Amino acid sequence: MMKLDILAFGAHPDDVELGCGGTLAKEIALGKKAGIVDLTRGELGTRGSAEIRDMESAAAAQILGVSIRENLNMRDGFFINDEEHQLAVIRMLRKYRPDIVLCNAIDDRHIDHGRASKLVSDACFLSGLMKIETEYIGEKQQQWRPKVVYHYIQWKNIQPDFVVDVSGYNHKKVEAILAYGSQFYDPNSNEPETPIATKNFLESLNYRSQDLGRLIGTDFGEGFTAERHLAVNSLADLL
């Protein structure tokens, strides 16, 4: 099985691109292996369809350069944080054995985001327990617990615990987001308007990244929250 350095989870296709697309593009350019696991196909979305979003997510994955992208086919809007769903996430964690997991915002406008955040976080802990047995394609899996879990920022302007400098990679993030042509602003579309399909939302992606970059003295940034205290080996590690 392929071991990944970073595995990013999203409740819906496009969550990862919106929340941490620049960070993934940068880490991949630096030689890290990264992948994406979508929990649902976003079938309840007002615009587009699950089939369209399947194609869009594949195109976005290619733009970012991730090594793998999988979809767990959970029910959009109705998945819950129970044993069945935790085991599905655990199988992915044990399959790819990431050191770093990125996942949804802990609190957000869409109810799936906070729920996905807790589901993935709980699964990361449980995945390290050897007495929880799982199999993948008929083979027994070994326990695995990621070193850290970080939560990207979504609709709400949550105060980040740290900001990643994504200068030089924000354009790649925007390109991956725009691969979801069914979901975002298109002046020629006849589909219903949604909160994320407005011109303002599309523009807000840039000015949020620019503002976070401004706060850390760079051009663009992406913010994350952490589940534990952040540690550095030296004061010189800080930008």
Image (tube, rainbow, N blue to C red):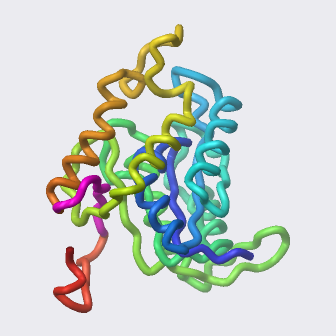
Q: Is residue 230 above or below residue 84?
A: below
> Residue at coordinates 30% horizontally, 70% vertically from top-left?
227
In the foreground, 119 or 207: 207
In the foreground, 41 or 210: 210
In the foreground, 17 or 159: 17
99 left or right of 238 in image: right
In the foreground, 68 or 85: 68
> Residue at coordinates 37% horizontally, 48% vertically from top-left?
114
Percent position of residue 35, x then y: 59, 62
Percent position of residue 44, x then y: 56, 28
186 left or right of 151 in image: right
Highlighted magenta segment, given as a residue range = 217-226
Confirm whether the magenta stretch covers residue 223. yes
Confirm whether the magenta stretch covers residue 32. no
Dominant SS of magenta comes to: strand
Farthest residue toward the bottom?
Answer: 233
> Residue at coordinates 64% horizontally, 72% vertically from top-left?
96
Percent position of residue 92, x then y: 64, 66
Work out which quarter of the rendered image holds the C terminus and state it. Answer: bottom left
Q: Is residue 115 above or below residue 165?
A: above
Percent position of residue 88, x then y: 64, 60
Work out which quarter of the rendered image holds the N terminus and state it. Answer: bottom right
Residue 18: quadrant of the picture: top left
